[in-house]
Image (cartoon, rainbow, N blue to C red):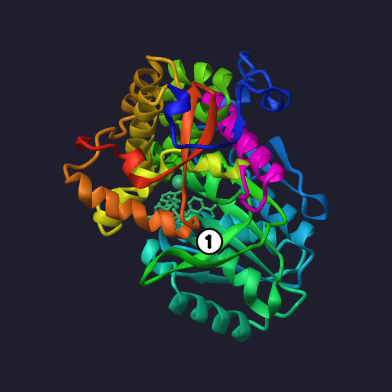
Amino acid sequence: MRSSLPSTRIDRYGRGEEGKSKRMKMKKSAPRSRDTKTSKGRLTGAGRARAKVPVELGDRSYCVELGIDWLTTIGRRVADGLDAERIALVTVPTVARRYAPMLTRGLEAKGTRVKRIVVPDGDASKNLRQLAKLYDQFLDHGLDRGSAVVTLGGGVVGDLGGFAAASFLRGIPFAQVPTTVLAMVDASIGGKTGVNLAQGKNLVGAFHQPRGVYIDIATLRSLPRRERAAGAAELIKAAVICDADFFDWLEPRIEALLDLDPKVVLPALERACAIKADVVARDERERGLRRLLNFGHTLAHAIEKHAGYRGILHGEAVSIGMAFAAKRSEAMGFAPAGTSDRLIGLLERAGLPTHPPDRPRSAYLSAIAVDKKKQGGKIHFVVLDGIGSAGTAALRPQDILPAGWKA
Ligand SMILES: NC(=O)c1ccc[n+]([C@@H]2O[C@H](COP(=O)([O-])OP(=O)(O)OC[C@H]3O[C@@H](n4cnc5c(N)ncnc54)[C@H](O)[C@@H]3O)[C@@H](O)[C@H]2O)c1
Ligand SMILES: [Zn+2]
């Protein structure tokens, strides 16, 4: 079966020896009781880090630190780590109202001057106009080469604020405080920053690694369940492409994860962050391995484009794309029968969609062709070898969506 594929496997991850050496055992033990206590009631911001994941990139290495109810502590650590006289705190309205005061208290503890900059909510803010506004406000606040940026919010402010930091005065340091599941396990790690153009998403940007990523899982309490599930799609993606143990562990715990049971959220996020960190450390510039993180994204991008990036969340489109890619992996003989059923079962229990919107094959083909242009003529389609192991195949759009394929 495999030999009939017009494909070249360029890299793999997961069951291979390389993948194995980096994997850890999921802990089954229950956390200390005070972990659960802090999951309810008013936040104090005074907690501490409970887990640390290194992102090893030589002199640009940093850590992803996770904790519960520790925003003020985060503020102090960020200020110490950045050692900047002035900090621009870039955030969005909902998050600013709830969480900026606690974070700012910590940032200002040793006299750092903090300017809060609130950008409008939504992906539409990730554009050149907002970027130019940020530069203006940085200058108004007197930011110079000794200053820094802190982003507080989802992937949108992380990408926008991160790119502002990457480009202002040819680059100043920044730290990420992600507050969505998607930003925690995906967008905040790995240094991809940027904005959208009218012609497409993420067309302008830079690699600029943060000095640190600080996750407070207590901030997820205010995140709508639909957004939590969409972020969980990227977490499930991390498990299914390279960590079968994690996938096994997640299957009976997905509801608890979405309910934010700290016994589940903390280890699940830690593991997903470790996977992203490991992939980024081995392929920072997406020349091979990092492409595996695009599992499910070929069809997802087509779905998002057709929808005009409205009405469907990125993680929801990725869920549909993963279900599709898993079925194709089976049909092409890469993955054993039953692989896609297991993945689809987990996605559906997370409340995620798994069926593509009803459109003609030709519409999907032309949208996929755009991805092909961006990737230099080939689509590096990510296929599963089974649960926990993936590789890429260079395919033409018509091989990804064979004749007779129906949404
Ligand atoms: N840089 C990368 O590597 C990378 C990777 C994946 C995605 N992204 C980018 O990330 C963006 C999507 O990120 P996202 O899904 O986090 O979207 P988002 O930043 O728009 O956040 C989603 C929504 O949740 C709200 N929100 C955030 N935190 C909240 C909280 N704690 N409580 C209540 N509401 C909260 C936001 O205001 C927003 O309405 C896209 O622009 C995408 O291109 C970047
Ligand atoms: Zn994604």
Q: Residue furthest front?
A: 4
Amino acid type of the residue tagged 1 in the rendering: Asp
Q: Nearer the viewer, residue 182 or 139?
A: 182
401 in the magenta segment: no
Position in image of residue 166 (x %, y %) = 64, 69
The secondary structure that dominates the magenta segment is: helix
Q: Is any part of residue 43 visible from this angle?
A: no
Give left or right: position of 97 versus 70. Answer: left
201 to the left or right of 16: left
The answer to which quarter of the image holds residue 23 is top right
Instruction: Say which of 370 and 59 sits in front.
Output: 370
SS at mark 1 in the image: helix
- Which residue: 41% across, 55% down? 371
Decide: is 324 above or below 74.
above
Residue 406 locus on image (x, y percent): 19, 36
Residue at the spot 63% in from the left edge and 56% down from the top edge? 191
Name the residue tied to disc 1: 159
20 left or right of 119 in image: right
Can residue 170 be spotted in the picture? Answer: yes
Look at the image and tell me in which quarter the N terminus lies: top left
Looking at the figure, which quarter contains the C terminus?
Answer: top left
Any atom of ligand 1 within 8 Å of the CB at mark 1? yes
**For the residue carrying disc 1, how many other residues have a C-alpha within 10 Å: few (<14), some (14-19), or many (20+)?**
many
Q: Residue at x 57, y 61 (%)?
A: 193
Q: Is residue 25 above or below residue 221?
A: above
Res 109 → quadrant: bottom right
Span highlighted in magenta in the image: 262-288
What residue sits 31% from the left and 26% below the top? 348
